[in-house]
Amino acid sequence: MELAGSVGIVTGASSGIGAAVARELDDAGMKLVLTARREQRLQRICSELKEAVWVAGDIADEGLPQHILDTALAQFDRCDVLVNNAGLITTGTIEEIDLDRVTRMVRVNVEAAIRMAYLALRHFKTQGRGHLVNISSILGVKTRPTAGAYSGTKYAMESFSHALRLELAGTGIGVSSIGPGLVMTELHNHMLVHPSESFNIQKPLQPEDIARNVRYVLEQPEHVRIASMMILPEDSPL
């Protein structure tokens, strides 16, 4: 895909991987719609970019995904890329895990991501092109104790992505899943022990590492599809 002049949506764009992807795609010349809950952060990031607007809100609200897509069409007359990045992580033992947080995680990581994906893909089919990138996790193909619920949400997205690729083969619409290992973001701030300490990872990935690879996936020639990509720190034990 020629990214310059294309239009993309990035969810979970107020920090971490989402913010880094927004900056990388802006550098490639894309027009962007950014969404997340934290409006002030979205405003600040958009002010740094060449052509970007924001939609603040909770991606788990049923009406927000359609509003995001409608904003892209109203502002830029089209949408070519969705980077489905918004996500939460909750881990814990059977006795200790917060079930309300688990329910919230499933709504964001699975329900909202699937709703956003289907709405974008319906639009892509009307214009005969587009690319969906689902940000998954290494725990979408592996798992570990205490992370089963989070891992389950990412396994779901891997299966969803694969089924979409089969359905869309030959249509000009791409579907890719990117599974990072440990990335230094605010996603882990609520944890008592950071995963880098738990797994003795000296150099976790940075959000910019994932952003570069999102761009790489999108810039492949039309006949090339990168179906899935796993990106790991060099000392990852998984």
Image (cartoon, rainbow, N blue to C red):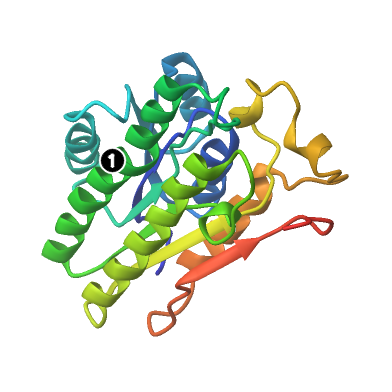
The C terminus appears in which quarter of the rendering? Answer: bottom right
Name above or below for residue 6 compared with residue 146.
Answer: below
Left or right, 20 with reference to 26: right
The N terminus appears in which quarter of the rendering? Answer: bottom left
Q: In percent of the image, x 53 and y 44: which residue is there?
A: 148
Where does residue 132 sit, x and y in percent of width and height?
35, 59
Residue 48 quadrant: top right
Left or right, 137 with reference to 119: right
Left or right, 17 with reference to 7: right
Q: In percent of the image, x 38 and y 80: which residue is there?
A: 222
Q: In percent of the image, x 23 and y 74: which residue is there?
A: 168
Residue 59 quadrant: top left
Q: Which amino acid is tagged 1?
A: Glu
Residue 73 quadrant: top left
Is residue 15 among what the camera can see? yes
For this rendering, which residue is in front, 149 or 7?
A: 149
Where does residue 116 sit, x and y in percent of width and height?
26, 44
Callout 1: few (<14), some (14-19), or many (20+) C-alpha neighbours within 10 Å?
Answer: some
List the single residue furthest toward the top. Answer: 40
List the single residue furthest toward the front. Answer: 95
Q: Mark 1 falls on what kind of element?
A: helix
Q: Mark 1 points at which residue?
A: 111
Where does residue 115 sit, x and y in percent of width and height?
23, 44
For this rendering, which residue is in front, 15 or 166?
A: 166
